[in-house]
Image (spheres, rainbow, N blue to C red):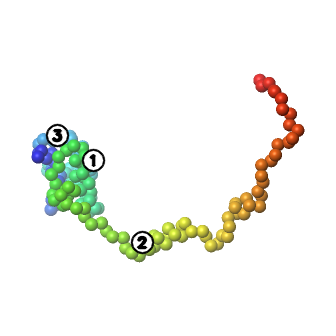
Amino acid sequence: MEAPHLYLGWHPEYGFVAASSPRLTDHLRDWALERVQFEPVPGTNLHRLTEPSQDGQRRARQAVTAIRGLGLVVQADFTLDPELSADPPRPAVSLGLAKRQARIAGAATARSPQRGTSVTSAVASVHRVGPTPAPASTVTGTTRGR
């Protein structure tokens, strides 16, 4: 197995963090980590996930996948590695919300009881006009264009 370029894990003070190995240049490390919303921690060689309280675990797992997609080797904690652990459970939609959304969707697609038939269909049914026949006395001949 190839030695990792980046290590991702949990730090008690900084939350989700990434550290790089000497195999990775500082410029490439900064570019890759800033792309997945990690910021440098002043005074350390660590980068931390910005706003980890906003779905941090899912974002850290996505960062592992995105960095691997760049061709870098990543070693991550068990819970952050999508290859080693299952996705965390997603919040379930409450039954009341699902019923409300279904009711709104049904109302949006149903015909309004306040309006009988549409005005355009009623007018079109009254004024049906077929094609007008051409007059029988048309002159057929050759005309010369410009």
Q: Nearer the viewer, residue 32 or 86?
A: 86
For label 2, the crowd category at 10 Å Cα-Cα, with few meaning under 14, some 14 to 19 and many 20 or more, is: few
Residue designated by label 2: 98
In the image, residue 121 lies at what x, y percent?
A: 69, 61
The amino acid pointed to by label 2 is: Ala
Q: Is residue 61 above or below residue 106?
A: above
In the image, residue 62 lies at what x, y percent?
A: 26, 54
Residue designated by label 3: 25
Q: Quadrant of the C terminus?
A: top right
Instruction: Determine contact: label 3, label 1, CB under 8 Å.
Output: no
Question: Quick one: SS at disc 3?
Answer: loop
Q: Earlier in the sequence, mark 3 or mark 2?
A: 3
Residue designated by label 1: 35
In the image, residue 87 lies at what x, y percent?
A: 25, 62
For label 1, the crowd category at 10 Å Cα-Cα, with few meaning under 14, some 14 to 19 and many 20 or more, is: few
Q: Residue at x 50, y 70 (%)?
A: 104
